Image (cartoon, grey):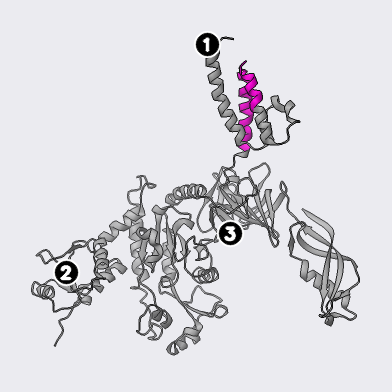
Amino acid sequence: MSVVTDSPVHSSSSDDFAAYINAALDASSPEALSDKDVENQDEFESVSRIKRRKFESIKETEGSTLEGTVKDNLAVAETSVEVDACTHPGSFGNMCIRCGQKLDGESGVTFGYIHKGLRLHDAEISRLRNTDIKNLLHHKKLYLILDLDHTLLNSTHLGHLSSEELHLLNQTDSLEDVSKGSIFKLEFMHMMTKLRPFVRTFLKEASEMFEMYIYTMGDRPYALEMAKLLDPQGEYFNAKIISRDDGTQKHQKGLDVVLGQESAVLILDDTEHAWMKHKDNLIVMERYHFFASSCRQFGFNCKSLAELKNDENENEGALTKILEVLKQVHSTFFDGLQEDLVGRDVRQVLKSVRKDVLSGCVIVFSRIIHSALPTLQKMARQMGATCLAELDPSVTHVVGTDAGTEKSRWAVKENKFLVHPRWIEAANYFWQKQPEENFALKKKHY
Amino acid sequence: MFFHIVLERNMQLHPRYFGRNLRDNLVSKLMKDVEGTCSGRHGFVVAVTGIENIGKGLIRDGTGFVTFPVKYQCVVFRPFKGEILEAVVTMVNKMGFFAEAGPVQIFVSNHLIPDDMEFQSGDIPNYTTSDGSVKIQKDSEVRLKIIGTRVDATEIFCIGTIKDDFLGVINDPTTV
């Protein structure tokens, strides 16, 4: 046998051989053995030893290059690999959801809010997100994550009701038919809950544009109970209720447990810092404080809505305004049907919608506390306003807290708007330029 | 699979039950204690069907409680790998669906649902074939094959598949 004639065959077969060895090593079951090796099997007990033996036996025959045999081996190995090579995309009760094999250790992200004992791996999550997004966009929907407390409702402990709120105890709606009521006493949890005005219409209309999740920092039983009040028929939040017990990080909310692509998620929450990683998806809500305990919690010393026997206006409340914004974002996103929807990013849309709020406004700040200034400037810029440091004929608004400063006096003289910083904050909450008259700074009378 | 087997248990009885109804009390306590429980070896105890024998009671020092060794017949239910089961769908989502066969929780992932069935979101999430002839939704009855089981102290988890011949929907709630 000459080396020259032998070498090409040799090299090709050794390539095959390397592939075969890899395949055989991947396959952990003894079925991977080829017919040819059966005769050797009995003497070897452990699978690894069999494999080594196989390796040797093939090496022996290599010289004569039984390519056919090697290929046969390959075929056998491949079929058995197909059976065994389950990637274990996730687990349910510590068993692989695909092959039923028992898995040790706890890996992957827990999806306890969907079902106890369910875990999924990143690859599977992204696969699900990808298939889901196509389906969802086809139905012209996006994802919407809703916070509970201070966004959709306000709850208080029964013991924390102030004396002026005790009249509410006689006004609670029955728990028999929650779909009509708005204020409930949950005796067994010692809670009183008030739904935000307009919330039912909001959910109904939003459900046509969005697949909705609840994501709350409350615990699981509380979240489920609130969901029952908001969605008695279970049509909106079916197994999409995430509580703090389900999150992956303490004191943070994250989209990692949401089976939705980040580029199609909108978040409605009153607490910005809970969503550190997803600020671009976030629409910050004006907090709903119905009960005195909730006002106190956030350091307001005014009377609560309950104490004043008042409530947010159905037609002008925060939810009404935000629904308008959601509709606008939704229609912008799905504008111009034919284009590649998957490539679109709702965060960009949100940004551009926000940019329209104060577009055309040129703002100069006057005597604002140093620590508050950057936030205000950022807010104003996000809403499309231009912020200047010095006065300039193009300026349209002077924002300040004192009507006596030079800039303020200039504004009055030049007939420009002189407004309180709350004007910017209000625009930020309502996504709409607010009438300047309501926030005008009056010159103090000394 | 169901089995009718004999099990044994040591029952502790409070002295207040001693009297002519002692046996009845013992049996009703046994039923209360074991029915619906789960053991890794035997599966779920579905029902106590009879008492084989009650051994001699042993009085515990100090407490006055008496321990009786009780042998009883009962029906147990234990799922096995490879077994075909009929189950009721409890939840459908994009990952697959969950079903219950009595006390057993079964998950069928969408890897193990035939490829021609697609997930449809909406008010009633479901898996439907492209021609709409077969639909799996909440409360559907399905026949499935168990491919993995894990028995805990208190519950049994199973992985099921309907990606095989003669498996799938057997009763659709919408057509009834």
Dominant secondary-structure state across the stretch colored magenta: helix
What residue range appears in magenta? Answer: A55-83
Question: Image quarter for residue A142?
Answer: bottom left
Name the spot of residue A264 as percent of width and height, x first.
40, 54
Instruction: Estimate how packed mark 1 is, as few (under 14), some (14 to 19) or many (20 or more) residues with alpha carbons within 10 Å.
Output: few
Expressed as whole percent of the image width and height from the top left, the position of residue A12 reads 53, 20
For badge 3, the amino acid type reads His
Residue A309 appears at what percent x and percent y? 39, 85
Residue denoted by label 1 = A4
**Most extreme residue toward the bottom, as rendered?**
A163
Q: Nearer the viewer, residue A133 or A67?
A: A67
Horizontally, residue A283 falls left or right of residue A100, namely left
Q: Is the residue B76 above or below the residue A52 in the image? A: below
Q: Is residue A296 magenta?
A: no
Q: Are marks 1 and 2 on the same chain?
A: yes
Q: Residue at x 41, y 62 (%)?
A: A206
In this view of the protein, which residue sits in the foreground, B25 or A199?
Answer: B25
Q: Which residue is mark 3?
A: A115
Chain-order first, disc 3 or disc 1: 1
Residue B39 screen position, x and y as percent: 75, 60
Label 1 is placed on what type of residue?
A: Val
Distance between the alpha carbons at the discs numbered 1 and 2: 89 Å
Quarter occupied by the N terminus of chain A: top right
Question: Which amino acid type is marked by label 2?
Answer: His
Residue holding disc 2: A397
The residue lying toward the viewer, choosing from A223 and A339, is A223
